Image (cartoon, rainbow, N blue to C red):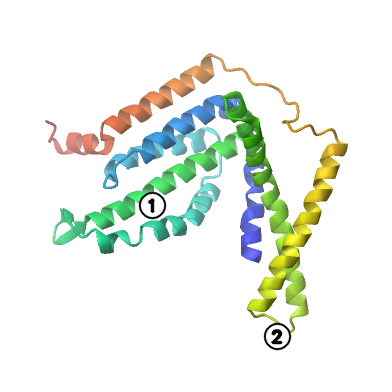
């Protein structure tokens, strides 16, 4: 419980990073959201055996991280947290898809291993892009941008509340876990029944906490919409940003950039 709590609370640093002063931070959030959406659509549209064609797409998060002066190590660690889930999704592929599609010297690589690697790579790319977007923009600004792009306001509000109150839930869970440890001298009371009691207690505490938060929000004038914020302007810089990255993603989707580069280096161009 403590490790999960620490990982969730550490995500608060993303909103702190969004307060930067680089030109990327000052771009209208809609431009960054649109470019990231095009990136994700292009990445997930590849076939299950595509691998080398995905590698050039790392240029997008790498460029944004460098231009936005973001901590690459911190973001890489957050991407690594998602890796076990991607591995769990594709780990059975090598057992079911045993057709040999590639030979690397004496090693035969089956389609299952290629699809497994493709799942992990696409997961890393999409999560890296989403984390970079949040670190450059802030989750609240992303939700406002989505509303201005046409997303229903109630759905955007639910996304914002889910993100914000995950930290509250982590704090409540951490306090409940510490209280349980202080009351279970040694191994006594650490069975499954105690975990069921802990979850029930956590549910009641979060319910009461949510009611208090809602009353506090109403007392401060909450009307079901986003608080007033300075509206960004979608100007020429934003248009060029979206146009450049979208065109690059479409070109990389249609042509295997890594394959073309390899053919150029080896002199095997058609």
> Among all residues in the image, which is located at the extreme top?
236
Residue at image location 26% in from the left, 61% down from the top: 96
Residue at image location 49% in from the left, 18% down from the top: 239
Q: For this view, does 2 lie left or right of residue 67?
A: right
Q: Which picture quadrant has residue 100?
A: bottom left
Identify the element where label 2 is drawn: loop
Q: Nearer the viewer, residue 9 or 214?
A: 214
Q: Nearer the viewer, mark 1 or mark 2?
A: 2
Image x and y of residue 152, in percent: 61, 30
- Badge 1: residue crowd in 10 Å (few <14, some 14–19, many ≥20): many
Image x and y of residue 98, in percent: 21, 60
User: How far is the residue under mark 1 from the one under mark 2?
Assistant: 41 Å
Residue with the mark numbered 1: 120
Q: For this view, does 79 lie left or right of residue 142?
A: left
Q: Earlier in the sequence, mark 1 or mark 2?
A: 1
Quadrant of the image containing the C terminus? top left
Image x and y of residue 15, in percent: 65, 41
Q: Is residue 111 above or below residue 135?
A: below
Label at residue 188: 2
């Amino acid at each position: 419980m403590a490790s999960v709590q620490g990982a969730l609370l550490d995500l608060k640093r993303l909103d702190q990073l969004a307060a930067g002063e680089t030109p990327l931070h000052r771009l209208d959030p809609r431009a960054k959201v649109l470019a990231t959406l095009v990136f994700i659509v292009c990445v997930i549209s590849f076939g299950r055996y595509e691998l080398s064609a995905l590698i050039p797409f790392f240029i997008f998060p790498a460029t944004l991280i460098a231009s936005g002066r973001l901590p690459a190590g911190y973001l890489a660690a957050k991407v690594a947290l998602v890796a076990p889930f991607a591995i769990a999704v594709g780990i059975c592929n090598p057992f079911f898809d045993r057709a040999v599609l590639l030979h690397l010297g004496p090693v035969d690589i089956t389609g299952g291993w290629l699809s497994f690697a493709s799942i992990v790579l696409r997961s890393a790319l999409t999560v890296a892009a989403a984390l970079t977007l949040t670190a450059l923009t802030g989750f609240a600004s992303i939700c406002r941008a989505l509303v201005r792009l046409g997303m229903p306001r109630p759905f955007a509000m639910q996304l914002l509340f889910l993100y914000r109150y995950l930290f509250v839930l982590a704090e409540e869970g951490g306090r409940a876990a510490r209280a349980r440890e202080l009351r279970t001298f040694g191994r006594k009371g650490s069975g499954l029944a105690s975990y069921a009691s802990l979850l029930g207690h956590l549910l009641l505490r979060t319910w009461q906490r949510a009611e208090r938060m809602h009353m506090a929000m109403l007392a401060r004038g909450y009307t079901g919409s986003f608080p007033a914020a300075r509206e960004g302007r979608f100007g020429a810089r934003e248009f060029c940003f979206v146009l450049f990255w979208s065109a690059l993603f479409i070109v990389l989707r249609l042509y295997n950039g890594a394959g073309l580069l390899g053919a150029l280096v080896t002199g095997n161009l058609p």
